[in-house]
Amino acid sequence: MLNKEDNDLLTRVEGDAPMGVLMRRYWMPVLMSEDVVSDGAPRRIKILGGKYVVFRDSEGKVGVLDEACPHRGASLALARNENCALQCLYHGWRVDRTGKVVETPSEPADSTFKDKIRHIGYPVREAGGLIWAYFGDPKFEPEFPAFEWTDRRPEQIYTIRVAQRCNWAQAIEGAIDAAHANFLHNDLMRRLAEGGDYTGGGGLQNLTLVDGAPTLEIQNLPYGFQYAAVRNAVSDGKPMQYVRTTQFVAPNWALFSAPEGWAFNQVFVPIDDENTVFYFIHAREGDEIIDEPYRAKILEWSGVGDLDDDFHMDFHSGNMWRQDRDLMDRKKHGDHFSFSGMTGNQTEDLGVQESMGPIEDRTREHLGTSDLAVIRMRRLMLDAARRNTRGETPLALGGGFLYGEIRPGEDLIEPGVRWQETVGSRGEVPATTRTV
């Protein structure tokens, strides 16, 4: 468990909260590239409690600006988007994607006022079908997190996105929690065991069903940590161990094993203290693409339905996260019962995480051995926030690794074989990139 002080430090991200100050030092996904079109409507977003607009100008380039016009504070989400600038409706001031004020038509024609003002614009990148921005101090701008999928073509990536009514920490804690898959995602595991073809058959993940109490072994690395969930299994009548690795990449990324030919990444972007946007990136390797029928299949398995403008489903505490208690009846439905009563693996995660409240009271927890990865993430992020406050280099910003080299995996190994020498070596830091 955490005391109240540490729970607040971990979860609070708005304003001058130390965790929010820390997280602004990393690149953050803010929207999907398809969300904005040239000269189209600006999109209003909220990240880490700050209010911004995202737009694509007449040249197809993306800008991320503070939402309030630098003149009188009117929302630039209402602005006209034309001629490579946003024009505020209130007095016609025009601001380009970098934050430069290019015209102040309500001022005298010979005024140089605009040359003395600059709006707040942020560094922007487009990669992997996402728009990314950096909201921190310019002198600390880090390298871009070029994960292995960020250079893939659009037809090779499919991303599930949905907003969660809970804090970022309890959302990512679900992604790095190996033990819950046996229970919360029991329906998914049974479908995989029956030959379901979610992303190529799910790899070996159906073996999760055979052992509900995995042993966790954790290895700290410059980007965060990787851990192995080790389960007893049997293959061809021979005792084996099913090993599945997961990486936590600071501050808010979780990578876990995918079937051959795929990469899976998840990121949990804090909107404010009590809301999060979750992205689940599915990427193909080589020259393979994800066609429309398969995109529909991924969406079906996720359970994510229609979203409103803030990326929420009609799925919340008021309708009990649409849980179907009748379908949970084993006697009535036999092998076709639903363990959770919720449809889709992402909706199951959202349901239980939101049920914990907007910010879980971690002073009331009773953690066990299956929670070791969650405990490690909390310790590392609390330490990173404190280090940042002291002016020291926080986690994952000191170099010593390449984002594109971080690779989770899964394997069946014989008892006595060290997982670090097989599946674990895929997520290790290559010796040539380590710092001493």
Image (cartoon, rainbow, N blue to C red):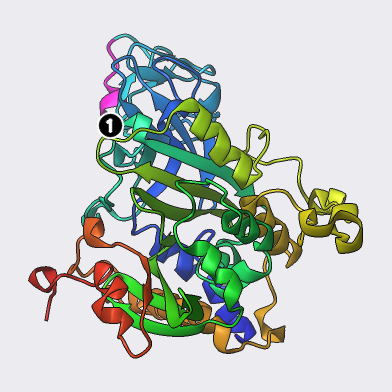
Estimate the x, y position of residue 396 in percent, counting from the top left. Answer: 29, 68
Q: Is residue 262 above or below residue 204?
A: above
Q: Is residue 422 above or below residue 95?
A: below
Q: Quadrant of residue 356?
A: bottom right
Residue at 46%, 54% in the rendered image: 266
Residue at 33%, 41% in the rendered image: 122
Q: Is residue 63 above or below residue 109?
A: below
What range of the chain is rendered magenta?
110-115
Residue at 56%, 89% in the rendered image: 369
Image mark count: 1
In this view, the residue farthest toward the front is 237
- Going by the numbered disc 1, the residue's amino acid type is Lys
Q: Does residue 298 appear anywhere in the picture?
A: yes
Q: Helix, strand, or loop for circle 1?
A: helix
Q: Work out which quarter of the rendered image holds the N terminus and state it.
A: bottom right
Nearest the viewer among 90 and 195 is 195
Q: Is residue 200 above or below residue 100?
A: below
Q: Which residue is mark 1?
A: 116
Estimate the x, y position of residue 205 in percent, counting from the top left. Answer: 50, 63
Q: Quadrant of residue 181?
A: bottom right
Nearest the viewer among 45 and 128 is 128
Residue at 39%, 57% in the rendered image: 24
Name the side, left or right, on which 97 lies relative to 304.
Answer: left
Q: Work out which quarter of the rendered image holds the C terminus and state it.
A: bottom left
Q: Is residue 6 magenta?
A: no
| Number of residues whose C-alpha sits closer than 10 Å to that of mark 1, classed few (under 14), some (14–19) or many (20 or more) | few
Name the side, left or right, on which 315 lies relative to 385.
Answer: right
Estimate the x, y position of residue 117 in percent, counting from the top left. Answer: 32, 32
